[in-house]
Amino acid sequence: MKPLRFFTAALLMAALVLVSSCASHRGLGRQSGQSKSVKETVQNAGEKVKETAKKTGRRVGRFAKSTRDRITHRRTKANPGAAAADLQGKDFLQQVNENVQPARFITSKIKFSVESGSRQMTLTGNLKMKRDDVIRLQLMAFGFVEAARLEFTPEYVLIIDRINKVYLKVPYAHLDFMRNSGIDFYVLQSLFWNELFQPGSSKMTEAGMDKYQTEPGVDDDMVIAMENGKMSYRWLASRQTARVKMANIMYNDHFRGNYQLNWDYEDFKRQGKTMFPMKHNVSFRMPEKEVKFEMVLNYMGAEDNWETRTTLSGKYRQVEIEEILRRFMSL
């Protein structure tokens, strides 16, 4: 059972990465007071993504090269068609925003892997999502015993360790850094559903699109960039299909070290009139730890006959974030 204990501890930490570290003062974003141009911020993003790619082995290095090549090209010639380019960029953003999955439910059996340092474990499980209501991950041990459950709703995050009979339930309203940074259920939903998002809003708006910048990359790539206070967001999208291929949120803290969340999408399959990624590769890098997890969907279902809220018996003990952090740091 020791490997299983490692898995549940690492899984809980991975969940915390998504809901807390990304938005805390230690987490992702940009220091206040910085006011770089779009070209400089995208270049900075590309250089940091490239640095992470050397360790993760993911294709974000291509994003960094694309960014450098694009910036070099732009600096060597004038750009008199800036207004036209802005209009084209907004049209492209609209295409990406419209290229979303219309289904209300997405369900699937999944293969889920968690890695921390040299430790790694893979289990099967279930993914159940209802648009604007809930995201649920159920991880199974031995193929039939639920080991852990992650449940994200607009009101709270619920993380259950079935092995040790403990859980963490955190209302978003109780997390000041979540409120202040705009990282909430709808941002997480967009990451799971392969969509653009507008921090602080449940959906993309026409006015909100003015905050985004688009820049052509090499080949089929388009770089989408947006700043929101201390947070810095980047997406890589296909110019031809208007599908999001990667989402990246970064923070450069000169005092505590760099933080980066990267979400890659692969193996797109048709679901109705749109495509959906069957493989999600996620990594979160901190100064002292790196957590990676991979989620592979077996199929695209739309089951709706399941309870969207989890209730727990009195056998479970509620714990604080600090206890889960201690478990993870002791791995």
Image (spheres, grey):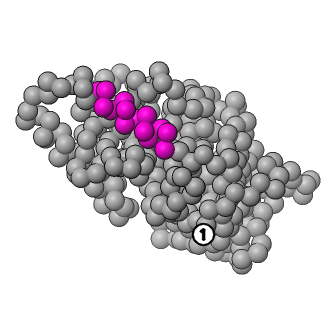
**10 with respect to 251 (left or right):** right
Tell me what residue is drawn at x 49 percent, y 39 percent.
98
The residue under the point 14% across, 28% down is 79
Q: Quadrant of the N terminus?
A: bottom right
Dot 1: few (<14), some (14–19), or many (≥20) neighbours within 10 Å? some
Q: Quadrant of residue 161?
A: bottom right
Front in this rendered view, residue 324 or 87: 87
Magenta-colored stretch includes residue 98: yes
94 displayed left or right of 309? left
Q: Quadrant of the C terminus?
A: bottom right
Instruction: State whether residue 323 appears in this view.
Output: no
Residue 176 placed where, x, y %? 62, 28
Relative to residue 220, is residue 330 depicted above or below?
A: below
Quadrant in the picture for residue 19: top right
Relative to residue 218, is residue 143 depicted above or below? below
Number of numbered tags placed on the structure image? 1
| Circle 1 residue | 298
153 up-or-down from 173: above or below: below
Up the image or down, 101 lies above or below 330; here it is above
Q: Where residue 22 sits in the image (x, y, percent)?
A: 52, 41
Q: Residue at x 35, y 21 (%)?
A: 33
Instruction: Give how far across and how far down residue 152 sits, in percent.
Output: 69, 46
In what element is the residue under mark 1? Answer: loop
Write the start and end of the magenta stretch as one range. 86-99
Residue occupying the point 61% across, 67% down: 299
Q: Amino acid at mark 1?
A: Asn
